[in-house]
């Protein structure tokens, strides 16, 4: 057997050895100590790591901004999403006349839906796609679509859907999980013929739109926010790492701002709890000392596009807006501070200084840039959880650097660490499957071209048997592996062997991503984050040696990936 060409890992190991030999003795000892870090510590490092898609030099970042909901404030799905679901169900009954006999049978599983899915409102389906928008998994209600139906509907059709527009809705925020679950429940109820007099008059799309309207009602009438205000510890996870992070960033010379769609009254409730643990009448304005600017009611993603929006200053003691005369500033007589502040803002000068942050409502990125004294969007890093509302628009329209918070990533990494060998085994099995498919195709072609048909037919039959066995083993192995991550939708960042649609969006629009905002404090504020090298398929060393592969093992799919 010919000697195998040196692969990419071999090159890296040799290069590493060369670099180590050139290190000073002290540096070499430090590197050796770091390399000897226990596996448990390395796993913990992976769970708290900030991952880089596009290289980012933090020395060139003058200001760092944060969203509030699901970024600084992490909600508990078992309580907050449950409450949101239950309030939405109530609104469907009271506002849209859904039968109480059906609704009271519903219960909510906060862990069933995942981000990155797409709702086909017209057909009543929930879809998971890969980076090419190829539908890999499809459910109608809670029943998986048969492969033939899935392919005929979404893949093998001359009118392939684009998965945008009014007929589709992307689940790109954690707030969407409850409404998607409720939609699947209503689809199932309609299909089962329950209360046909009611459901026969409603399309799947109408049901979804009414769910969305009911969710909006819950937010507009204040029922959700009032419950959080009364008992924030029930709905929000406390994090002691936030204050050191915010203080450290400001101490490093960077400006820090809060940019949220929530209004001042609710923002003050949430920030008091997550920063100081204050609730009810114990609330203070001390948390404002951790920020240079606070903008509430920002109406993202419009904030990133509409540079003519009116900005109002919020009186933090009363909650009233100060300049409300058609947007013209109304300055209290004799207030030199306010006169100076508004003149500076009008001239595009920075208004950031010592003391607590001033609070605003509305406006646009042009106001924020002026407050911070920033000329170019690339000098600003924004951290948020919403791929569309926080990341995509900020990156595409005003060139902000972006960091996406993906809480689910912690679980994803935990499963990856516990199954380190399985991805390699599955890739090896897939390569074997493909090689056997090539043999089948070749023997099939030779059988048609030569006279020695009996020999070729025998070889073809053997190759076909092995190919079928490899295909079955790979398919079952992939299913079992994906179930390790989620019992329905599998790995968040993968769809089959391809990156998922969600992973593709993260890679395309988020410069950085991590599981929790506090992970940023594990790095120097001056760090240079560097993206991994890109590899095209022809760059990779995919030469697999199958001389020791046990073909008999293909009869037991599980054994091939253990």
Image (tube, helix red, strand yellow):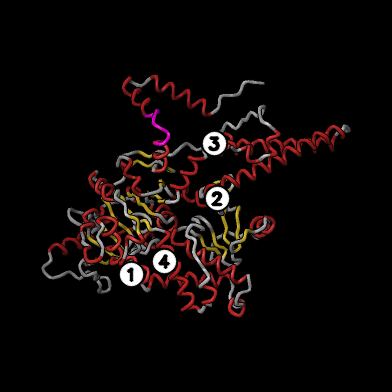
Image x and y of residue 531, in percent: 43, 39
Image x and y of residue 237, in percent: 35, 56
Q: What residue sits right under mark 1 in the picture?
A: 226
Q: Is residue 139 above or below residue 38?
A: below
Image position of 558 (left or right of 306): right
Q: What residue sits right under mark 3 in the picture?
A: 421
**Mark 1 vs mark 2: which is more N-terminal?**
1
Residue positioned 48% across, 23% down in the render: 14
Segment tinted magenta in the rendering: 34-40
Residue positioned 54% across, 76% down in the render: 101
**Mark 3 vs mark 4: which is more N-terminal?**
4
Residue positioned 46% across, 72% down in the render: 214
Q: What residue sits right under mark 2 in the picture?
A: 490
Image x and y of residue 162, in percent: 58, 59
Visible in this render: residue 10? yes
**Label 2's element?**
loop
């Amino acid at each position: 057997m010919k000697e195998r060409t040196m692969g990419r890992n071999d090159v890296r190991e040799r290069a590493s050895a060369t670099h180590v030999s050139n290190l000073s003795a002290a540096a070499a000892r430090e590197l050796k100590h770091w390399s000897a870090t226990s596996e448990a510590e390395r796993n913990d490092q992976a769970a708290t790591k900030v991952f880089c898609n596009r290289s980012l030099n933090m020395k060139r970042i003058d200001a760092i901004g944060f969203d509030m909901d699901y970024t600084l404030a992490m909600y508990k799905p078992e309580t907050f999403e449950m409450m949101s679901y239950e309030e939405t169900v109530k609104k469907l009954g009271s506002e849209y006349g859904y039968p109480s006999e059906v609704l009271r049978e519903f219960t909510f599983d906060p862990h069933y839906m995942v981000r990155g899915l797409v709702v086909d409102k017209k057909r009543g389906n929930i879809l998971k796609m890969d980076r090419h928008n190829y539908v890999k998994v499809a459910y109608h209600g809670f029943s998986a679509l048969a492969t033939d139906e899935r392919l005929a509907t979404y893949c093998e059709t001359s009118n392939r859907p684009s998965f945008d527009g009014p007929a589709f809705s992307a689940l790109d925020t954690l707030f969407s999980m409850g409404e998607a679950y409720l939609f699947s429940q209503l689809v199932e109820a309609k299909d089962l013929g329950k209360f046909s007099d009611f459901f026969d008059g409603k399309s799947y799309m109408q049901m979804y739109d009414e769910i969305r309207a009911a969710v909006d009602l819950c937010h507009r009438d204040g029922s959700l926010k009032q419950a959080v205000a009364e008992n924030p510890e029930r709905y929000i996870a406390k994090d002691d790492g936030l204050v050191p992070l915010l203080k450290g960033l400001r101490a490093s010379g960077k400006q820090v701002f809060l940019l949220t769609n929530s209004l001042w009254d609710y923002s003050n409730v949430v920030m008091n709890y997550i920063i100081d643990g204050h609730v009810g009448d114990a609330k203070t304005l001390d948390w404002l000392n951790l920020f240079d600017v606070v903008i509430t009611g920002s109406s993202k993603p419009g904030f990133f596009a509409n540079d003519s929006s009116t900005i109002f200053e919020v009186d933090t003691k009363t909650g009233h807006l100060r300049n409300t005369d058609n947007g013209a500033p109304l300055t209290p007589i004799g207030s030199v501070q306010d006169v100076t502040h508004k003149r500076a803002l009008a001239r595009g000068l920075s208004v950031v200084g010592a003391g607590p942050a001033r609070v605003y409502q509305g406006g646009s990125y042009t106001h924020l840039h002026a407050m911070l004294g920033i000329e170019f969007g690339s000098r600003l890093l924004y951290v948020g959880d919403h791929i569309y509302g926080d990341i995509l628009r900020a990156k595409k329209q005003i060139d902000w650097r972006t960091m996406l918070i993906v809480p689910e990533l912690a679980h994803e990494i935990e499963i990856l660490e516990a199954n380190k060998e399985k991805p390699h085994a599955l890739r090896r099995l897939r390569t074997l499957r493909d090689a056997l498919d090539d043999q089948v195709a070749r023997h099939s072609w030779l059988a048609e071209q030569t006279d020695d048909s009996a020999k070729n037919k025998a070889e073809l039959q053997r190759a076909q048997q092995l190919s079928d066995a490899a295909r079955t083993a790979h398919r079952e192995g992939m299913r079992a592996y994906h179930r390790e991550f989620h019992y329905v939708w599998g790995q968040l960042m993968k769809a089959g062997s391809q990156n998922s649609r969600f992973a593709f969006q993260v890679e395309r629009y988020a410069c950085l991503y991590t599981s929790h905002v506090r992970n940023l404090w594990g790095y120097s504020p001056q760090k240079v984050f560097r993206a991994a090298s890109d590899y095209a398929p022809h760059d990779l060393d995919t030469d697999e040696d199958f001389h020791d592969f046990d073909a008999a093992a293909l009869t037991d799919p599980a054994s091939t990936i253990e």
